[in-house]
Image: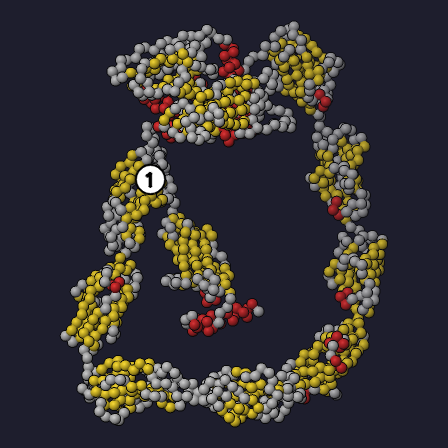
């Protein structure tokens, strides 16, 4: 039923009709009001009990009644009554709605003012609802309205959160709720909520909210403080929210929520901030209208958090611009441009504010016609300001820049009817100002702009040519004496500063630019500019021609003397001195003088480094004045610095002598060596002399005894000569002694003697060293570490039976002689013990096989072999079975008569002779014994033997039987195909080997071992398994809510193994990125839950057996769209984006240096779709099945790990990525440092060809680095 249009004084804009609900259910009654406080009443009494909850959202007021059992009537006090009735199932229809009783008519302007001061966060939808004149009948959309109210009744929270709260048990936790209040701008206000804690085990959770969603806990600070206390006596929690120095934009609807476990309570209240009179708005409109929620329902509302955090606003420099005045006078097409210019980002909020301002705009009461916005006049002209007033008797006051204007000859006031005129005569630049006229409290403003006449250049600048150092003046004349003239050099303005080289001179209309002591850098284009013209001229500054009045002269100076160079030129300009092209800097030793046109260079205590070509170059000129200085010094021999006693040099024969004698002299002297009357001039002989600038060198290669003597050195240059004598003495080691004689040998010792050497090397013999070694060895061992003074010695602790040799060294002060010839070998000998564990290994009709173990004690002479002897039972003669000794511990005696009995014994032989025999205790019957065949099947082969495809199958099955059994294999009843399966048989076992197993190798294998008529059988079951195929078909059976039901069929190929489960993955259609939902799932149907509403999904399923997941997956043909209930969504059509791309390395490989023996890794990253296959290569050879390399790929990062690399692993490594769209590769070099020997490579099993190639590369790299 529509509301009466004449009821302008009613506070209700939307009224709830009478509603009928079922008993025990919940109902909600909603009404729309203007911003004022209301009360809900039942039977004339205020509603306040546990069954009712009131909510406030902007101008929307709601009461919620739970568990209604009887008819109840609620009303809003003073305005409208709304009834809520509850009855049983046989309820009668509700009576007609009660019409509203209008309140007395309120003051219209006051109501309008209240509406204008409402919170700027109110949306345009709220304005439309409040202005509507009717409410839709309850029966048209009661279901949708009930759903909406049930969702948003808790303060417009999120729908999911509200649904959860509806399901929880409602209870009234508040014992005191915060009430609405008002405060003036700048004042403080406090809101208090109390919760009873008698039934609570812990502190409840309280939230303070503003508007729909803004949590004020994160905004606490200078203007907002939250506090909570607990009264232990009364068991009451008190929660306080205090707003300090409130601002106008703090007005609005607030909400306090309290939660404890499954209990929840909420209370809404309003805050009204009253603006202080005559206080201008201090909030920057551009910062106030920031977007508070991009793309949301409350977009365009004031950013309350930003306003709470705002600190003191600093006044902006320059005139304040009223953006709203610009917007009101602008065209709507220019709104976006103006908003961008002044930083307003919320266009929707700006338009709403502008709309209200246009409604608020009032027509001026004092002025019927205001001043124009601006006036413009030329300098010296007359301007006329005209304004019309509504009341001719009103008194006006005129102001200029805030100062009142008084009548004068310059300012003339005139009245014509309702017109008030102000004339300003002879306008100057001082009159360029802001003017204002006041009529009581109303004002009208304008601005006056005064233009100056242009200044002309009456006399142009002229081009000037000058020399460096001269004074230059550039002159021009202008049309006005007080003109503002600017000078420029190549477009850069010149200023008349104190330290500037440029001076600006003004003489009436004449303006002059003065440059003192001009240089070449002043050459440029100079210009002068005025408001009405400009002029330019060229200035060219050149150098004067230079003449050399006195050149530099060449000089020769002794070392340590002074060098003095002097020259004179025609111009007084500075210059630079150079030596051999290098600039000379002044110092304590080097002095540079410049006086007028004379330049001098003085160097004290001349050094050898001071010699060279000198030159002087004047600045700004290309002239070069040269001179040569030659420094000389007499030669000297500094033999004392070598510290040789008596000038004697001792050298050991056979060694190389390099005798360096320091010499000095400038220029470098010539050095001559001589011995007696013979000059040493050879440069490549055994004795040679070499000359260097600072020393002379005498070299004797492999010095000999004949090289001893006196040598003479002479140095000579143009300044003089010097001579010195040097003695050289050559000494040597003694000759080796003669071969020693071993006179006596014992069990572990011997006695030896020798003669002294013939030549002692020029030094007395100090003693002897004795060494011995085994005859078979090449390693000598020293027997004495202290010199033996005698020529006899007794070695001890020798091993019996080992052949030894001894030798002697002679020692003098120079060194040790070469060894003497070795003595004759001598060997202590001993017989070994008898062989052990003599047993019968086998018997046939004509042979007996014996085996034994070596002797327990083998003498020092070693073991040369064994002799086997046998004797027939009853005879005494022992026959030798092997004419030649055998070194094996098993021997077969052949040629024996069948049925005879023999005794057998074995002897060990060495250099000392045969050992005691080892006799078999019992006679041996010569007759073969049959052993039945027996297969000893290993335990792990008694069950099914399972291997994966590609793995090796190696089965070793031992058996026994004599004579040697015959072995045969069958697969599934047929003979084994030996082209695919290798079988090797021996006397005691059989081996079945498959290099790469295939599924066709699965089956039952029968083994049969046969000895004559006896046989034994065994069966082995081999199962070769592989990854299964993908499921046969995947279907989407049903989609409901956030769930999808899937069904599929088992794969056709189970990989020869039972299917152990399935892995299910999902992918959003927009990204097509797959994520695993279920793993190891055993059934062939599943329900996928917790999907995102609004997304569209594909699903795929992998099969799984004991080998792992199937290589491919079966994907659903159709997609599943998760739609939101209750709202039809029309899905837009988008073209599928092509995500495929060829491989591309986003991070390449980097050259790496590794340490031998420590693991090294190479890393790179690649992208591509489909996922590329990664291959690693070493020197362009693919790395496969090598345990020293490990390859990883995780999140497109490819890693190659080299375990304990050696220098052999140094090479160029390549990573190659390939997919259907192309391929890409990247490589790097790996260098392994640490070195490795030839022997170590050989022990590691590296082929000789590879070792040889590696050694050559290593040698070449060392030569290159050297």
1014 or 521: nearer the eye?
Answer: 1014
User: Residue 1233 appears at what percent x and percent y?
Assistant: 51, 65
- Is 456 situated above or below 60? below
1155 or 337: nearer the eye?
Answer: 1155
Q: Quadrant of the C terminus?
A: bottom right
Q: Which residue is mark 1?
A: 1097
Residue 1019 left/right relative to 55 = left
User: In the image as oriented, which residue stretches furthest toward the front?
Assistant: 233
User: Residue 419 appears at what percent x and percent y?
Assistant: 64, 9
Quarter assignment of residue 16:
top left
- Is 407 situated above or below 177? above
Quarter assignment of residue 904:
bottom left
Residue 924 left/right relative to 634 = left
Query: Which residue appears at 40% of the width and 53% of the height?
Result: 1193
Secondary structure of the residue carrying tag 1 is strand
Whether residue 1120 is visible, yes or no, is: no
Residue 650 left/right relative to 571 = left
């Amino acid at each position: 039923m529509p509301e009466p249009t004449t009821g302008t004084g009613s506070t209700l804009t939307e009224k709830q009709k009478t509603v009928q609900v079922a008993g025990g259910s919940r109902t909600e009654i909603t009404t729309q009001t203007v911003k004022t406080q209301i009360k809900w009443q039942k039977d004339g009494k205020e509603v306040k009990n546990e069954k009712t909850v009131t909510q406030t959202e902007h101008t929307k007021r709601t009461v919620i009644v739970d568990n209604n059992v009887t008819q109840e009537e609620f009303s809003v006090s003073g305005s409208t009554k709304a009834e809520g009735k509850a009855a049983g199932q046989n309820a009668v229809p509700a009576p007609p709605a009660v019409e509203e009783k209008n309140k007395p008519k309120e003051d219209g302007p006051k109501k309008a003012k209240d509406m204008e001061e409402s919170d700027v966060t109110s949306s345009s939808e709220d304005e439309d609802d409040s202005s509507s004149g009717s409410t839709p009948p309850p029966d048209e959309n009661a279901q949708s309205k009930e759903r909406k109210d049930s969702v948003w009744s808790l303060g417009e929270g999120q729908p999911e959160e509200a649904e959860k709260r509806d399901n929880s048990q409602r209870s009234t936790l508040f014992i005191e709720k915060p009430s609405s209040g008002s405060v003036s701008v700048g004042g403080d206000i406090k809101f208090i909520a109390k919760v009873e804690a008698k039934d609570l085990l812990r502190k409840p959770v309280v939230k303070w909210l503003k508007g729909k969603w803004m949590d004020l806990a994160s905004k606490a600070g200078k203007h907002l403080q939250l506090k909570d206390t607990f009264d232990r006596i009364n068991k009451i929690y008190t929660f306080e929210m205090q707003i300090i120095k409130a601002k106008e934009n703090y007005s609005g609807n607030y909400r306090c929520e309290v939660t404890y476990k499954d209990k929840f309570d909420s209370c809404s209240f309003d805050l009204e901030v009253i603006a202080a009179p005559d206080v201008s708005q201090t909030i920057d409109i551009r910062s106030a209208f920031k977007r508070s929620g991009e793309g949301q329902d409350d977009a365009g509302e004031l950013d309350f958090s930003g306003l709470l955090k705002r600190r003191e606003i600093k006044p902006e420099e320059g005139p304040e611009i009223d953006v709203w005045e610009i917007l009101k006078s602008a065209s709507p097409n220019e709104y976006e441009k103006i908003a961008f210019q002044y930083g307003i980002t919320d266009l929707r909020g700006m338009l709403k504010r502008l709309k209200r301002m246009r409604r608020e705009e009032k027509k001026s009461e004092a002025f019927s016609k205001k001043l124009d916005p601006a006036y413009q006049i030329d300098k010296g002209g007359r301007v006329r300001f005209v304004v019309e007033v509504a009341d001719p008797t009103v008194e006006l006051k005129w102001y200029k820049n805030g100062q009142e204007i008084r009548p004068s000859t310059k300012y003339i006031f005139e009245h014509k009817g309702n017109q008030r005129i102000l004339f300003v005569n002879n306008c100057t630049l001082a009159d360029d100002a802001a003017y204002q006229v006041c009529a009581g409290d109303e004002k009208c403003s304008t601005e006056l702009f005064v233009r100056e006449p242009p200044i002309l250049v009456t006399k142009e600048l002229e081009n000037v040519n000058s020399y460096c150092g001269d004074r230059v003046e550039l002159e021009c004349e202008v049309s006005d004496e007080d003109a503002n003239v600017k000078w420029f050099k190549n477009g850069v303005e010149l200023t008349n500063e104190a330290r500037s080289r440029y001076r600006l001179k003004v003489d009436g209309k004449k303006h002059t630019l003065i440059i003192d002591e001009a240089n070449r850098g002043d050459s440029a284009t100079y210009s002068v500019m005025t408001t009405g013209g400009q002029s330019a001229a060229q200035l060219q500054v050149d150098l004067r021609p230079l003449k050399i009045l006195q050149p530099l002269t060449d000089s020769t100076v002794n070392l340590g003397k002074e060098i003095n160079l002097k020259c004179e030129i025609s111009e007084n300009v500075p210059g630079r001195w150079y030596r051999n092209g290098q600039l000379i800097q002044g110092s304590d030793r080097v002095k540079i003088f410049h006086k007028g046109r004379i330049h001098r260079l003085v160097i004290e205590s001349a050094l050898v480094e001071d010699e060279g070509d000198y030159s002087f170059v004047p600045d700004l000129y290309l002239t070069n004045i040269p001179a040569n200085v030659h420094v000389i010094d007499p030669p000297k021999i500094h033999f004392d610095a070598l510290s040789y006693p008596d000038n004697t040099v001792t050298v050991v024969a056979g060694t190389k002598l390099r005798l360096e004698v320091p010499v000095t002299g400038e220029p470098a002297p010539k050095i001559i060596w001589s011995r007696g009357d013979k000059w040493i001039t050879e440069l490549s002989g055994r004795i040679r002399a070499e000359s260097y600038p600072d020393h002379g060198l005498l070299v004797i290669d492999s010095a000999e005894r004949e090289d001893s003597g006196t040598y003479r050195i002479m140095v000579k240059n143009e300044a003089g000569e010097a001579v010195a004598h040097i003695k050289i003495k050559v000494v040597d080691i003694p000759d080796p002694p003669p071969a020693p004689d071993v006179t006596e040998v014992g069990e572990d010792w011997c006695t030896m003697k020798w003669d002294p050497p013939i030549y002692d090397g020029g030094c007395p013999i100090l003693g002897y060293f004795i060494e011995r070694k085994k005859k078979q060895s090449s390693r000598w061992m020293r027997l004495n570490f202290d010199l033996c003074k005698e020529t006899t010695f007794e070695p001890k602790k020798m091993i019996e039976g080992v052949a030894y040799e001894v030798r002697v060294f002679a020692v003098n002060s120079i060194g040790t002689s070469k060894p003497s010839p070795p003595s004759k070998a001598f060997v202590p000998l001993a017989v070994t013990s008898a062989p052990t564990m003599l047993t019968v290994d086998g018997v046939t009709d004509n042979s007996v096989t014996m085996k034994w173990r070596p002797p327990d004690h083998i003498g020092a002479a070693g073991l040369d072999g064994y002799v086997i002897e046998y004797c027939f039972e009853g005879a005494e003669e022992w026959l030798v079975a092997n004419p030649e000794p055998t070194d094996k511990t098993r021997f077969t005696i052949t040629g024996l008569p069948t049925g005879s009995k023999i005794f057998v014994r074995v002897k060990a032989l060495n250099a000392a002779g045969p050992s005691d025999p080892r006799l078999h205790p019992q006679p041996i019957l010569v007759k073969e014994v049959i052993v039945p065949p027996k297969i000893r099947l290993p335990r792990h082969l008694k069950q099914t033997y399972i291997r994966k495809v590609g793995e090796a199958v190696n089965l070793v099955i031992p058996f026994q039987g004599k004579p040697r059994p015959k072995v045969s294999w069958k697969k599934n009843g047929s003979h084994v195909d030996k082209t695919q399966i290798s079988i090797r048989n021996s006397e005691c076992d059989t081996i079945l080997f498959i290099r790469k197993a295939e599924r066709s190798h699965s089956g039952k294998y029968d083994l049969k071992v046969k000895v004559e008529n006896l046989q034994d059988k065994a069966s082995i079951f081999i199962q070769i398994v592989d990854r299964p195929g993908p499921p046969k078909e995947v279907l989407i059976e049903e989609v409901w809510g956030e769930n999808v039901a899937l069904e599929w069929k088992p794969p056709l190929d189970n990989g020869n193994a039972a299917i152990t489960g399935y892995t299910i993955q999902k992918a959003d259609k927009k990204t097509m990125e797959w994520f695993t939902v279920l793993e190891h799932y055993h059934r062939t149907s599943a329900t996928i839950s917790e999907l995102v509403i609004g997304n569209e999904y594909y699903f795929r399923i992998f099969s799984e057996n004991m080998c792992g997941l199937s290589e491919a997956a079966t994907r659903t043909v159709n997609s599943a769209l998760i739609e939101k209930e209750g709202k039809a969504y029309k899905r837009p059509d988008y073209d599928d984006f092509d995500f495929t791309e060829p491989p591309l390395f986003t991070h390449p490989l980097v050259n790496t240096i590794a340490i031998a023996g420590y693991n090294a890794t190479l890393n790179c990253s690649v992208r591509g779709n489909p996922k590329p296959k990664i291959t690693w290569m070493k020197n362009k050879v693919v790395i496969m099945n090598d345990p020293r390399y490990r390859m990883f790929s995780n999140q497109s990062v490819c890693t190659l790990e080299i375990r304990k690399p050696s220098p052999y692993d140094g090479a160029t490594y390549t990573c190659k990525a390939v997919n259907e769209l192309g391929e890409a590769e990247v490589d790097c070099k790996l260098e392994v440092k640490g070195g490795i020997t030839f022997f170590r490579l050989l022990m590691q099993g590296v082929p000789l060809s590879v070792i040889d190639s590696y050694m050559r590369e290593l040698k070449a790299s060392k030569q290159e680095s050297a």
